[in-house]
Image (tube, rainbow, N blue to C red):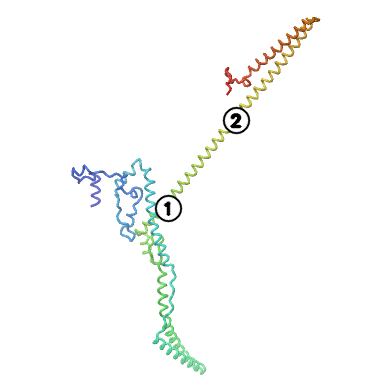
């Protein structure tokens, strides 16, 4: 019936049996609604694993629909919702395993606890009389055995020794029977074993058929799936965390290299600019030196030529020499100023620009 109903719902829709009035208020269920089981969408629902077992969780309160699961797998938001659904499923499974581990610990403690053997109860008066009679018989038989042995009657002495052994066995049975029952019970208790996967009690060294039946049982397989999923989810989280850490370290290393590269580039530009300034200064000084030397030679030639022309003139010649010297000094200062104005670095001109740099 359920299969036919699901087939009809797939062909005609879930609202096929509703009236027109009911269809007005009907809302189609989608995979991302709160009523839909996210555990079933992404992996498995724990409520489906332990049906009709001692660990039965009851029916799931949310919707399990294969059609909605198929729609979820084909949705473009599938990869976005998978981590959230898996995290919720992992939390639910961890709670189940915590409860199971508590049961396992209690069962292990019950199996591992040492059962103290109580002291034997006091012997009753009736048993005391029986023991006294047995001891008396044993004593008499031993005396007879000794006498027969001295007389050389070995066969008769051996027959009496068998009777003595039987009497000793009866005596042991009277004194040791309760303790033997307790030891037998402890031995039976020690034959039990505990399954670490599902917490079930097993019989140690049981038949292979019964062991295989337990391993293939619904409860054992269900808890195995739960434990495997928890381990897988933890491993994936640790791997993602490690990859994120490596990505952060790689990004930090790239930023550090970029800063070093920029710093090296800035240092090289600064050194290149410094070398250019020093070269300009050296060229300016060299030009000034050559110009000063040429002007000195020119002044020397002028003095020699004027001295030869003026000869022995008096005060007029002195005045003329003074004026000429003053003019030469003024010309020399002007020439120096013009030479400095041609240096772009010394007088604040940018290279390739005619306008001076404005002082701050």
Q: Is residue 289 above or below residue 304?
A: below
Between residue 253 and residue 232, name the one nearer to us.
253
Q: Is residue 96 above or below residue 298?
A: below
Answer yes or no: do the residues labelled 1 and 2 have beta carbons within 8 Å?
A: no
- Mark 2 residue crowding within 10 angstroms, few (<14) / some (14–19) / many (20+): few
Q: What residue is shown with label 1?
A: 231
In the displayed image of the protein, which residue is found farthest to the bottom?
Answer: 151
Element under disc 1: helix
Q: What is the x, y in percent for residue 91?
A: 39, 52
Q: Is residue 189 above or below residue 41?
A: below
Nearest to the eye among marks 1 and 2: give it: 2
Q: What is the x, y in percent for residue 210?
A: 36, 64
Q: What residue is shown with label 2?
A: 268
Q: Tell me how many marks there are.
A: 2
- Mark 1 residue crowding within 10 angstroms, few (<14) / some (14–19) / many (20+): few
| Image point (43%, 51%), residue name | 234
Q: What is the x, y in percent for residue 131?
A: 42, 87
Element under disc 2: helix
């Amino acid at each position: 019936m359920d299969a036919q109903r699901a087939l009809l719902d797939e062909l005609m829709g879930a609202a096929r049996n509703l009236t027109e009035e009911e269809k007005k208020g009907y809302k189609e269920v989608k995979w991302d609604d709160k009523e839909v089981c996210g555990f079933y969408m992404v992996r498995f629902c724990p409520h489906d694993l332990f049906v009709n077992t001692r660990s039965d969780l009851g029916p799931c309160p949310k919707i399990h629909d294969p059609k909605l699961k198929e729609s979820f797998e084909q949705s473009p938001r599938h990869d976005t919702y998978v981590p959230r659904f898996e995290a919720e499923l992992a939390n639910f499974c961890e709670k189940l395993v915590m409860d199971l581990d508590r049961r396992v610990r209690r069962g292990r403690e019950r199996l591992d606890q040492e059962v103290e053997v109580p002291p034997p109860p006091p012997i009753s008066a009736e048993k005391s009389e029986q023991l006294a009679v047995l001891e008396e018989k044993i004593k008499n038989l031993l005396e007879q055995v000794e006498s027969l042995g001295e007389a050389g009657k070995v066969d008769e002495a051996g027959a009496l020794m068998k009777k003595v052994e039987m009497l000793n066995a009866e005596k042991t049975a009277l004194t040791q029977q309760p303790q033997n029952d307790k030891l037998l019970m402890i031995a039976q208790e020690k034959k039990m074993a505990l399954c670490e996967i599902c917490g079930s009690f097993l019989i140690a060294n049981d038949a292979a058929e019964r062991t295989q039946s337990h391993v293939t049982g619904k409860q054992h397989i269900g808890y195995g799936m739960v434990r495997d999923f928890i381990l897988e989810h933890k491993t994936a989280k640790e791997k993602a965390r490690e990859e994120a850490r490596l990505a952060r370290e790689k990004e930090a290393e790239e930023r550090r290299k970029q800063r070093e590269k920029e710093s090296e580039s800035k240092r090289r530009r600064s050194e290149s600019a410094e070398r250019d300034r020093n070269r300009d200064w050296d060229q300016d000084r060299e030009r000034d030196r050559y110009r000063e030397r040429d002007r000195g030679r020119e002044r020397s030639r002028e003095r020699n030529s004027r001295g030869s022309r003026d000869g022995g003139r008096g005060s007029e010649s002195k005045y003329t020499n003074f004026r000429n010297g003053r003019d030469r000094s003024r010309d020399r200062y002007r020439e120096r100023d013009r030479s400095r104005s041609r240096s772009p670095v010394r007088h604040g001109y940018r290279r390739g620009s005619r306008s001076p740099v404005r002082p701050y």
